[in-house]
Image: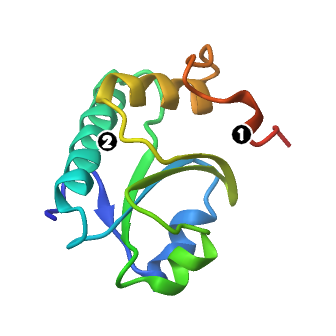
Amino acid sequence: MEEGLVKEVNCLEWESFAFHPSPLIVLVFERYNRAAENWKALMELEKAAKVFWNAKDRLPPRTIKIDMNIETDLAYALKVRECPQLLFLRGNRMVYREKEIRTADELVKMIAHFYYNAKRPSWIDGAAVAPPI
């Protein structure tokens, strides 16, 4: 998977990304298992991230990807058992875990909700969202 708006990181780089106060979205994928689904999830995430990069009025979320077959310890620590999966983090805290592949428009609404105080989309289960600190 090529480098675009979503940077691939390894275990050693994780701390510099995870423990930063700005919004972070992590795509956990498998490069060779269910490749079409993983590629679709990546493309939709890149389209959604591009919307926020082009907005100019607020800091866009950082987006990274982790190959769970290479970074097995990190995937285990993040409690990821199946891919693709999107993790929404703020600081060092997991805000939400999305196991469905969402369209870019749906992801934009989710990002706006989790990081910019927008209305909660109907498909997000309120009980699954981590309470604010």
Q: Is residue 126 above or below residue 62?
A: above
Closer-to-camera residue (34/56) = 34
**Residue drawn at 24 percent across, 62 percent down:** 34
Q: Determine crowd level at label 1: few under 14, some 14-19, many 20+ residues with C-alpha closer than 10 A.
A: few
Q: Residue 110: where, in percent of width, then height?
A: 51, 28
- Alpha-carbon span between mark 2 and mark 1: 21 Å
Q: Residue 52: where, in percent of width, then height?
A: 36, 29
Q: Quadrant of residue 118?
A: top right
Q: Residue 122: where, in percent of width, then height?
A: 57, 16
**Residue drawn at 26 percent across, 56 percent down:** 38
**Left or right of 7 on screen, residue 111:** right
| Quadrant position of the N terminus in the picture | bottom left
Please tell me which of labels 2 and 1 falls first in the chain.
Answer: 2
Q: Determine crowd level at label 2: few under 14, some 14-19, many 20+ residues with C-alpha closer than 10 A.
A: many
Q: Residue 93: where, in percent of width, then height?
A: 71, 55
**Residue drawn at 19 percent across, 62 percent down:** 35
Q: Name the residue beneath numbered marker 1.
A: 128
**Left or right of 29 on screen, residue 124:** right
**Residue drawn at 21 percent across, 46 percent down:** 40
| Front position among marks 2 and 1 | 1
Circle 2 sits in a helix, a strand or a loop, which is it? helix
Which mark is drawn over residue 45? Answer: 2
